[in-house]
Amino acid sequence: MRCAVALGGPVVVNPPELFESQPSDRALVDSDATLQCRLKAEPSSFNPVLMFTAIDAEFDYLLWDRPFLLDENLQWSVNPEMVEAFAFGEDHLEATLTLKPGLRWQDGTALTSADIVFSWSRILHGKVLARKARHGTDEITHCRAVDERRVQFKFKEALATNKWSVDFPIVPRHVYEPLLADDPSMQRSDAAVKANRMPVGNGPYRVVEWLSAERIVLERWEAYSGKKPAFARIIFRVIPDNNAALLAFEAGRIDEMSLAPRQFAADTNSARFAKVGVKAKGEQWTTYYIGWNVGGKNAFLTDAKVRRALGLMVNGELINKQVFFGLFERSVGLFPAAFLPADVERLPPKFDPVRAGRLLDEAGWTISEVDGWRYKNRPVDAPNAASVPAEFKLNIVSASQTSPRVADIFQSDLRKIGVRMGVEVLEWSVFNERNLEHRFDAFLSAWTCGPDPDEARNLFHSDAKRGGRNYVAYENAAVDDLFDRGRRTVDSDARKKIYGDLERIILADAPYTFLVDAPTLWAFSHRVRGVTLSPRGPMHAFPGMRAWWTPRKPSPAN
Amino acid sequence: MWRYFLKRVLLTVPTFVGVILLTFVVIHLAPGSPATADDAGLGDSGMSAVEHQRLRAHYQMDAPLHVQLARWTARAVRLDFGRSFANGRPVSQIIAERIKPTLLLTFGTILIALVLAIVIASFLATRCGRPIDKLILTGCVGLYAVPPYIVGLLLIWIFGVWLNWFPFAGLTSDEFSSMTTWRKIADLAGHSVLIGLCFVGPLLAYLIPFIRASLLSVLKEDYVRAAHAKGLSTRRVMFGHVLPNALLPLLTVLGLIVPAVMGGSVVLEVMFSWPGMGRLLYESIGRRDYPVIMGMTIVSAVIVLLVTLVVDLLYAWADPRVRYV
């Protein structure tokens, strides 16, 4: 829910006009205006098959249309601009898609079912680095063009997630097929790089300039057959530094930027900021957590009782207040409420050192009278006897400004109950490598939940322990079974019940401790309208920036 | 002189090879890989073990290190530095784009700082011990002590946001491609002012005391006193006898300044969104983009070694004693 509030100053948060839809009277909309956006870094490619970073994704809906959409509530839907009909077969093992007649690529070539089949085959090709696009698409065993407008899909299994599997990106066959003989990867020849940087898309914008590390300019494709966006041009300025970006916003050089918690709470309450913009805050499915290596060598962390005790030592209120300026929410569980039955009651866990101490005592990790730290089964009368200390090391990412502060608070609280925690700061690539190889005790990170609960499968299913995202080496046959049933259950209510059960088991086993949920925090210039805040922020769901507009300035004569 | 030249050039070769070899081994043996760096962008989906393996094969990292080095060397000697892991573009093309802003910044600021430092230091050397001398020297210490990041933010805020005199992000304006040549030069200069000041400030703070001290020591020489006794004007003594001798040690300092300025520009390039080599290196290391890192190492090594070579040769030319050391 959104509501407009003033934060102790003149700057308004979530003003109603920011979310105002485009009026039907086009005379009120400035259709010649230029929107200026901020990019933290350059995209890697505009080829949607190869796109994989969040920066790449900002361009996805602008340059490309695809038959299916992820709407602002992260619900799957058919794209009415492209699709005449789509239906699954009765057994859910087949589906047929019928494209609308007259679809075109930006160079005027007809967009047909052959483009869809070509795209599917490229995504699954061994030489193509379709890092993100391959996920789910590999559930499709068969993709055949029935005729110019009809495509038939066949799936490995009748899964509820098959609707996501058909939502893969499409690229123009006539552009890429001639390049394949020289470069089957679609990214290692000059011609392919050119096609990826200045693509022939089918979305409402086309790329007119890409000046490396400086700016990317998109222009509205006037022949677009769907609903045309209001802004005639979008200039993306590459501004890596957050402070410089805020100054650029205040100088009127960019119209939007995401804000760090500190910027939102402290740096944007001035009259100077109020003169140029407003702030927006919305729910985002991003959760900060600590992952425990439950299958690792540290005996302290292999006991669920110990992990639950450590979870009770997370002072969520303090972390939120001191690190995230009170803008975050205490996490209540694994999934967003939308994935669970309506009657599931979830309460934020309380910071409870007394109960945590009791749980550790019960698990055999008692406080030594000699040094005050906890040890496993240390005889009171033989303090020098070999025993296992209650200690672990928490890995954090060096690029994160908040992780060291969260770790400090946690470390200080754990010390009070006799648990030693060390902190190791690692560069992202090394951090990730250690996780993949299960070479850690615990790590602090954040994830953004996908639009389907099955996305969490590769975090918790035992078959994702080797090379998947089950970094914590969690294994529970009941959880595996529920994940397998969840993806095979098509009925929405029945699925919700399964994921409710799943969450309960996982919270009890505590392979992760969930800390806080991060909101989306943004700054927009006064002139921007039509913003929607999805759980993935204002850009990464449909219609995203396509719906943004700015009112036409009254002419002097009026 | 030719013998000295040949000796210096030959010494440059093993240094160059050593730098390249060391960089190659270090970046490949360091923990982390392009595959694990890529995972950062994947959010909710993540990569499977098969995907990681595919990435390693794509980046040709599945071969032993010496094989990778041999492959890379075979290409590099043909001046083919490969393609960026991040976007598939030829490394030479990427570096060609990014080296221009860096060279503009490095040599432009060094030149401006040198001219200003010589003028100011000459002024101070003839007023040694006076209040203005003390004031400027104290100012130099202060300027050297303030981190360039703080100076940069301050300059952006005052001249970019508040007064709105200079642009502070990027190298060119949106209309750059349609500008006349003179407008283009003015546009580039405008974009370079604030970031340039961040470089010129610390350089001045370093060079002014150095040149001043050198001038003062030469001013005490007998031949300077003799020149004055001959009745030459102060200006003639300064420019004809003192400066040429006092600036000789500056050649050595120049050899040190160039790599320092080129290497120290990362923070400022990020802050001013300057599309230079420092930022490219920073981004490439984060992404483990080995071909770009290696390409940049080669280019930086060539520039630094070339500058050092030229400085050494100039020194040998100006002071013949050096050739016989």
Image: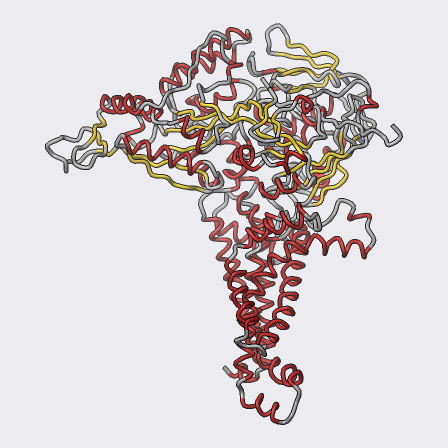
Between A161 and B98, which is closer to the camera in this rendering? B98
Give coordinates of residue B80: x percent, y percent: 64, 53
Pick the quarter of the image with the N terminus of chain B. bottom right
Q: Quadrant of residue A180?
A: top right
Q: Is residue B307 above or below residue B149?
A: below
Q: Quadrant of residue A465?
A: top left
Give coordinates of residue A95: x percent, y percent: 65, 12
> In the rendered image, is residue A164 in sight?
no
Between A221 and B70, which is closer to the camera in this rendering? A221
**Name of the residue lying farthest toward the front:** B131
> In the rendered image, is residue B48 in sight?
yes
Give coordinates of residue A30: x percent, y percent: 80, 28
Between B71 and B122, which is closer to the camera in this rendering? B122
Q: Is residue A159 above or below residue B284?
A: above
Labels in figure, total: 0
How is colour applied across the structure in the image? secondary structure
- In percent of the image, x 53 and y 58: which residue is there? B20
**Name of the residue lying farthest toward the right:** A557
A199 lies left or right of A412: right
Between B56 and B95, which is closer to the camera in this rendering? B95
Q: Is residue B154 above or below residue A442?
A: below
Give coordinates of residue A40: x percent, y percent: 61, 39
**Name of the residue lying farthest toward the bottom:** B230
- In percent of the image, x 55 and y 9: which residue is there? A490
- In percent of the image, x 26 and y 32: which residue is there? A418
